Amino acid sequence: MSITIKTPEEIEKMRIVGKLAAELLDYIGPYVKEGVTTGELDKVCHDYTVTVQQAIPAPLNYAPSGHNPYPKSICTSVNHQVCHGVPGEKKLKNGDIVNIDVTTIKDGFHGDTSRMFYIGEPSIQARRLCETAFECMWLGIAAIKPGKRLGDIGQVIQKYAESHGYSVVREFCGHGIGRNFHEEPQVLHYGKAGTGVELAPGMVFTVEPMINAGRRDIRQLGDGWSIVTKDHSLSAQWEHTILVTETGYEVLTLSSGSPQKPGNLP
Ligand code: MF3
Ligand code: CO
Ligand code: CO
């Protein structure tokens, strides 16, 4: 498979599903409180997606090669969990940080987005990590324009993260998205400016940097999905689905509750 250029009709469908995914994150926000279990958050998201949005949660039973089918409808990655945290019985407690990653299918197209949520009062270090990861995502997005290259996105993210003393996870990356959950190209969150695929209008892909407070190394838990930092340091991630336009980019996963792009970025 190669990189697909979306038609205007396909782009319109991706706008619709992108907004649904973002609105699901808006909806779950008030439930993300001390004492709730990640399994309960999964159920609320599943029911809202299916019943209210009349859409499909893409993670449920998703089974890329080498994986057992994913058992839940969202990913919840708490503290040192990097990504693909499987919701369960664990209660969220004061000071936790949690990434909620949702992917919605509507009318055959996917929208993929995630945000960090705070439980009560996280530490200054945890907040700073989450804010820096948010800025990393937006710096990567701001680098998107026809004629630029994928390496330009990775380079700005890596440079910004490392200048704050953080590390960038290498094993997972952004991805093309459309009729399929994961399409070409791979969007690395590290690299060299001026290298890699040239961006062209109609490409749609995610930017979703995973930033660790400690070392970049990760390992997978016995559930076959959950990824954690090897050194148990905190990890944070944000994700948007982006369309390359004639003049730059359009964020497809925005809603009224989306945290805004930081004012001090290009
Ligand atoms: N939403 C994740 C991503 O951003 C993928 C999750 S796959 C799942 O690519 F099966 F764990 F849901
Ligand atoms: Co993604
Ligand atoms: Co995602």
Image (spheres, grey):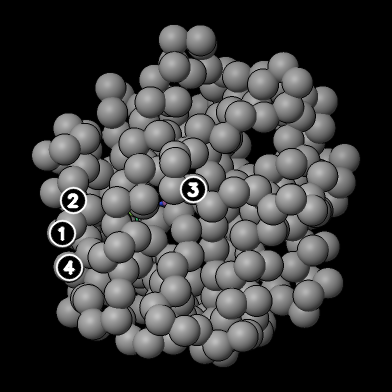
For label 4, the residue is 40
Residue 155 appears anywhere in the view: yes
Could you give the CA–CA distance between mark 1 and mark 3, rounded to whole angstroms? 22 Å
For label 2, the residue is 46
Mark 2 is surrounded, within 10 Å at the Cα level, by few (under 14), some (14 to 19) or many (20 or more) other residues, namely many
Amino acid, disc 4 = Glu
> Which type of secondary structure does the marked residue at label 2 adopt?
helix
Q: Are marks 1 and 4 in contact (CB under 8 Å)?
A: yes
Instruction: Give the vertical position of 201 relative to 116 (above or below).
Output: above
Q: Are marks 2 and 3 in contact (CB under 8 Å)?
A: no
Could you give the CA–CA distance between mark 4 and mark 3, rounded to whole angstroms? 22 Å
Q: Are marks 1 and 2 in contact (CB under 8 Å)?
A: yes
> Which type of secondary structure does the marked residue at label 4 adopt?
helix
Could you give the CA–CA distance between mark 2 and mark 3, rounded to whole angstroms? 20 Å
For label 3, the residue is 258
For label 1, the residue is 43
Could you give the CA–CA distance between mark 1 and mark 4, rounded to whole angstroms? 5 Å
Q: Earlier in the sequence, mark 4 or mark 2?
A: 4
Give me the residue at 30% from left, 74% from top.
Answer: 33
